[in-house]
Image (cartoon, rainbow, N blue to C red):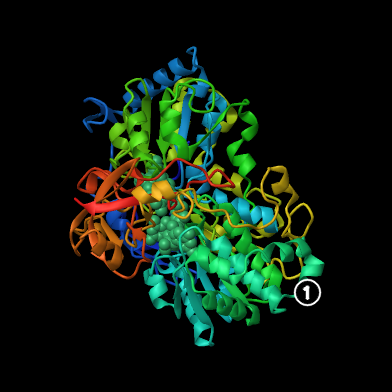
Amino acid sequence: MTNPLPTLDSTPHTVRGACPHDCPDTCATLVTVENGRATRIQGDPDHPVTSGFLCAKVNRYLERTYHKDRLTTPLKRVGPKGSGQFAPATWDEALTDIAAKLNAIRTSAHGPESILPYSYAGTMGYVQSQSMDRRFFHLIGASKLDRTICATAGATGMQMTVGANLGADSEGVSESDLILLWGTNTLTSNPHLWPFVLQARAKGARVLCIDPIRTRTADQCDEWIAIRPGTDAALALGMMHVLFADGLQDDDYIAQYTLGGDALRERVREYPPARVAQITGLAEERIVALAREYGRAKAAFIRVNYGLQRHAGGGMAVRTIACLPAVTGHWRRPGGGVLLSSSANFQFNKQRLERPELSPAVRTINMIRLGEALNAPDAGVGGPPVQALIVYNSNPAAVAPDTNDVRRGLARDDLFTVVLEHFQTDTADWADWVLPATTQLEHWDVHFAYGHLYATLNQPAIAPMGEAKSNAEIFRLLAATMGLDHECLRDDDITLVKQALDTTGERMHGVTFDALLEHGWVRLNVPRPYLPYAEGGFTTPSGKCEFYSERMAQMGLDPLPAFTAPYEFPDIATELAAKYPLTLISSPRHQFLNSTFVNVESLRWNAQPEVMIHPVDAARRGIMNGARVTIANDRGGFTAIAQVTDAVRETVVWAPSIWWTKLAGDGENANATTSQRETDLGHGPVFYDNLVEVSAA
Ligand SMILES: Nc1nc2c(c(=O)[nH]1)N[C@H]1C(S)=C(S)[C@@H](COP(=O)(O)OP(=O)(O)OC[C@H]3O[C@@H](n4cnc5c(=O)[nH]c(N)nc54)[C@H](O)[C@@H]3O)O[C@H]1N2
Ligand SMILES: Nc1nc2c(c(=O)[nH]1)N[C@H]1C(S)=C(S)[C@@H](COP(=O)(O)OP(=O)(O)OC[C@H]3O[C@@H](n4cnc5c(=O)[nH]c(N)nc54)[C@H](O)[C@@H]3O)O[C@H]1N2
Ligand SMILES: [Mo]
C-alpha cells in the first residue's frame, strides 16, 4: 500500500513536480534534492507557461515545507473546544478513536448523513483532493458537499452560453491586438499570463483593466476602467448596444453559430450608454469608446477571472461577457475570444477516481453555507444535524463567508471535528483531532490546469515530514480501521494517478503516465493554435453560442443576458446603504494564496491587515492614513490599518485577504462581514457583494 519512497541519494538530483495551488497557472516545478532534503525549487524553464519562474509564494515553498510549525504527529484535543490545546498521539490512537466515533455516529439514530466532508482546493491534485476521500465518504453514506466556494457562478455562466467552462487558449494572448483584463488581478492571481500580454503589447496591442481597484495589474495597463462593483453585465450589454448600433457585429458569425441573435439585439436596446453610465459609474463616452475599440479590433482577448462573479449576478455577468466575441466574431482568430477557464478541456477519469456509483442517495450541503449547516438542527436542508465534520484541503474558519456563524457551529460541543492539515490553522484550532498531512514535495499527484492546456505529474521529492501521511493514505487507513471493506479502498497513490489517466477522451491522447514521468507535463491533444469556437463547435444543447438560453428559461431565469444588481447595491438597497455605504472587496493579497502562506514569515513580514480607502471617503470619516479602523456591518467586523489612496474607486474599500484570524491581531478577518447568500447561477458565494462602514477603531 505504501508508495515507493524517494531514494536517499547523496548526489544532488532533480525531481519534477507540479505546483499544487488553486491558481490558473499550475506551474511545472523542478525540485533539487540533496541528501534527502529539498534544497531548491524552480519553475521548469521548458514549460511554455511556467517559463522558468515561480510566483512570490511558491518560491517560498521549501520554507513552508520545512517550517518549524509543520504538524508532524496526530494531535488530540486536551482543552476546551477552540482553546487550541492539543497533545501528540500515535496514529494508532488517532485512527482507533476517530474510527470508533464515526462508526458510532453513522450507526446512531442520526445516521451516516450526519457526517459531512469539508474540502476545497488546498491542493488541486486529483489524488489528494478527489479520489480516496470521495470513495470513503460514498461508502459510509455521508452527506455530500457542493464545492461552490470559488468558481461555480462563472462556470455555470459559461456552460449556459458556450456549453462548457472552456474558452480561448491563454497562449493565444500574444496574438491579440486588444486585451481586456476584466475582473482579474493578473499579476497577483495568474502571473504566468503576463509574458503573453507583454508579447502582444510589443506588437502594438493595448491592454485595459476593468476593476474597481487600481491593482498592481491595473497600474501596468494602458488604462484602468474603474467600474462599480457588480455592474459588469451592464457594461457588456452597453458595449453590445454600441456594437449593433454602429454595425460592428459579425453578421455571418451570428447567423451561422449563434442562437437568439435578434432577441439579443432587441435586449441590448434597453442598455443605451447613458443608462449604462448610470449603473456602472463610468462616463458615457468611455463606454462608447470601449465598445468601438473592441468592435474594431481583429482579435480582442477578454481575460475574465473569478473576481467579477462574486456578486449576486455573477453567473449572468460572466454569461453576458461571454457573448461579446460571438457578436464580433473574434472567436475566429488566434488571440480572440474569452477565457474564464480551460478546465473543461481536461478529460481525466473522475468517475473511476471518485466512484460516485458507490454513494447512496444522500443530501448535498452547500459549502458556503457551512455556518447555517452546522447551526441548524436539519443542517439547513432537511435531514439530521451535522454530528461530524472532516476537514481537509481547506480552512473554513478563515475562508468561508460569515465566520461568526461558522465559528458558532465549530464551537458546538456535540460536533466531532477532524482536520487533516499541514499547520495548526484557524480551523484546526476547533478540531477534536488534527492529523498531519504531506505537502506536494512528499506525495504523488496528477494535475489539470484552469489557465492553460498542460497536464502535469507531481512526483514526491522527499520523504514525508515526521509522521505525515498523504490524504489518500489517511482515508485508506481510516476506512480499514472502521472495518469498511471494498476493493477500491486499497488502491495506492500511484494506482490512483494511473486510474485518473485511464481515459478514452480524445484530448487526453498522449497524456500517459510514462510520458508524464519522462517530461513532467504534456500538452493536451488539441491543435495549435487552438481556436475552440472558430467555426462554432459550441457544446450547448443547440450546438450554438446561446444568446438565448432555453435552459435558463426553464430554471425560471431570464433567458437573455441581463444586468442583475448585487444584493447590496446602494442604488436599490438604500436603507442598508444609508447605514453601510461602502462596498468591501476582499480579494487576494499578493503574498498569500487564499489563507495558505499567511504563516510563512517571509511572506507576511510584520505586516498587519490593511484596508485601502479613497481620500474622499476617508476625509468624510476623519480617517487619517495609517489609522487603525474598524470595518463592519450587521454580520460582524474586523480591524485594519487604513491606507488612504485613490487606487480604489470612491465608495469601494479593499482589504487584501485572506488573513488567518489568529495572526491578524484582532482574531477576525474580512469574512466576519461577508454573507452566506448565493449567486444567481451555480450557488456560489458573494464575497464582494458586501456593504460595510469604516470607522476609527
Ligand atoms: N497571489 C494569489 N494568487 C491567487 C490566489 C491568491 O489568493 N493569491 N487565489 C487563487 C484563486 S483560488 C482564485 S479563484 C484566483 C482569484 O483571482 P481572480 O480570478 O483574479 O479574482 P480576484 O483576485 O478575487 O478578483 C480579481 C479582481 O476583480 C476585482 N473585482 C471585484 N469585484 C469586481 C466586479 O464586480 N467587477 C470587476 N470588473 N472587477 C471586480 C477585484 O478588485 C480584483 O482586483 O486567483 C488564484 N491565484
Ligand atoms: N473574503 C474572501 N474569502 C474568500 C475569498 C476571497 O477572495 N475573499 N476567496 C475564496 C476562494 S476563490 C477560494 S478558492 C477559497 C479557498 O479556500 P481554501 O480552499 O480553504 O484555501 P486555503 O485557505 O488556501 O486553505 C487550504 C488549506 O489546505 C491545506 N492543504 C494544502 N494541501 C494539503 C494537503 O495535501 N492535505 C491536507 N490535508 N491539507 C492541505 C493548507 O495547509 C491550507 O490550510 O476561499 C474563498 N474565500
Ligand atoms: Mo478560488
Q: At 41% across and 33% down in the image, what residue appears?
A: 371
Q: Can you identify the residue that label 1 sits on?
A: 251
Q: Position of residue 686 (x, y in %)?
A: 47, 48
Task: Tell me which amino acid carries mark 1.
Answer: Asp
Q: At 49% across and 76% down in the image, what residue appears?
A: 208
The image shows residue 432, relative to residue 398, as above or below, that is above
Q: Quadrant of residue 274?
A: bottom right
Q: At 47% across and 29% down in the image, what residue appears?
A: 116
Is any atom of residue 25 visible in this view? no
337 and 293: which one is in front?
293
Q: Position of residue 540 (x, y in %)?
A: 74, 54
Query: SS of the residue at dot 1?
Result: helix
Q: Is residue 522 left or right of residue 543?
A: left
Q: Quadrant of residue 40?
A: bottom left
550 and 105: which one is in front?
550
Q: Is residue 261 left or right of residue 500?
A: right
